[in-house]
Amino acid sequence: MSDVSFVRTEMLPEQAPPASEVGLIGWVRHNLFSGWFNTVLTLVSLYAIYYVLSGILPWIFQSVWNANSLKECREIMLETWGSTHGHACWAVINDRWLQLLFGFYPSHLYWRPIVSLVLLLAALAPVLYSERVPRKMLILTAAYPFLMPFLMWGGTIWGPISAALGFVIGWGVYSVLSKQLSELIGMISAAVAAVIWWLVLSSYFTGAMDSVLPIGIEAVQSRQFGGFMLAILLGVVAIGVSLPIGVVLALGRQSDLLVVKYLCVGFIEFIRGVPLITLLFVASLLLNLFLPPNTNFDIILRVMIMMTLFSAAYMAEVIRGGLAALPRGQYEGADSLGLNYWQAQRLIIMPQALKISIPGIVSTFIGIFKDTTLVSIIGLFDVIGLASAIRADTAWNGIYWELFAFIAALFFVVCFSMSRYSMYLERKLQTGHH
């Protein structure tokens, strides 16, 4: 009986996978036509997309860009396509886009908001992309909160310098007292010193310096602010200031000091229990009743304060969620290294809590930026208020979709950019991966 065995002495050459299993065809087959039910869903979805685009694309691209009124738009549509329906009148955007962007800001000073926006992007660069941008640009980041009001409102340069001096004085007091006494006493004393400077001494310093060395640019009144510029201004201030306040509130809510804890809890629960529009009405109408007579408290500053406090309350809860998600071992590890409370928070606890909280933080940012449109209800001419004013003009009376589509596109660009940066940051920090 013979034993026959077959042993291959060399491997067969590799063959390419079937074209129907890889590439675009393979992806389509596995994801869109993997069974009869998926095939039906795919075909229904394609028809729905076709139906929507067949109405939207002609409306966008078969449209009128040059006209002086809605009536003239419709006449051009009738001559060109034989119908006034299904075609957009973008002439209103072509005619009023500067007003929608800048409100009633003086046209010869448009360069100032534009420079402020460019400087904002430059100031954010070392914060958002720290590994790619020179660290020296942090000087611009620190100076921007004082440069921006000077550019936007104008007036004397000594006002922003005086505001910056308050922080310098506070830092000096903290540096001295935190070494001699304790960090907590140093922080409280620094805050008190800065507030005394801003509320009492700052005006004397500004007046004296302005009389000796008057340097400044043309002043612009707050009532001239408006358009998308106002939304950016309110959004940037609310977002930038609410994050540090939210961190302090979140830590205060977890404090062992009962007074601090209940103050923070009371503030957070009160603000979160009241609609933003109510706070804006308080800022607009009621706040003046509690101020001394003849006090001129700028309306935009009042709105900024209310929006910042509103955002900070939500931010505190988002960050508290990040703190609660940290395992107890992180706190014990910080204690074992001999770190005090503030060192542990700065070096170990807070970086991890913020990393966990990134999606919630950015979601709060996007929400507060979109909420800037509510200021149109209290008489500020933001981009929504201006759209209503444009529609009240007899030339453009009756136009809706084009204005709101343009406004939606502006907000989408900003909010989508924030969302994409959030995803980039999560990937860079590898949130959720150990």
Image (cartoon, rainbow, N blue to C red):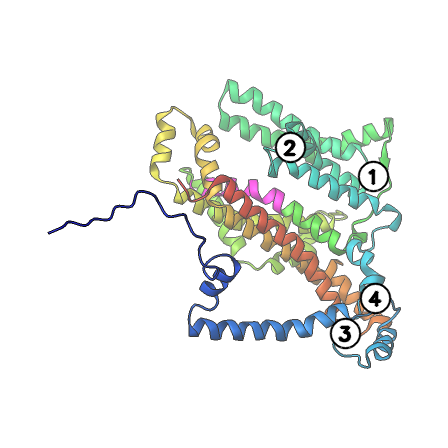
- Whether label 3 touches label 4, CB < 8 Å: no
Q: Position of residue 143 (x, y in %)?
A: 70, 33
SS at badge 3: loop
**Amino acid type, label 4:** Trp
Question: Which sits earlier in the primary sequence, circle 1 or circle 4?
Answer: 4
In this view, 40 is above or below 339: below
Question: Relative to residue 379, is residue 256 drawn left or right?
Answer: left
Which circle's residue, 2 or 4, is located before the other in the chain? 4
Label 2, secondary structure: give it.
Answer: loop
Residue identified by numbered label 4:
65
* Residue at x 14% of width, y 50% of height: 2
* Residue depicted at x 84% and y 43%: 219
For the view shown, which residue lies furthest in the left direction? 1
In the drawing, what numbered circle is on residue 133? 2
Amino acid type indicated by mark 2: Val
- Of badges 1 and 4, the one in the foreground is 4
State the extent of the magenta-drawn residues as a range: 239-254
User: Which label belongs to residue 155?
Assistant: 1
- Label 1, label 4: how far apart the Cα atoms are: 39 Å
Asked if the magenta segment contains residue 33, the reply would be no
Of marks 3 and 4, which one's residue comes earlier in the chain? 4
Where disc 4 sits, the SS reads loop
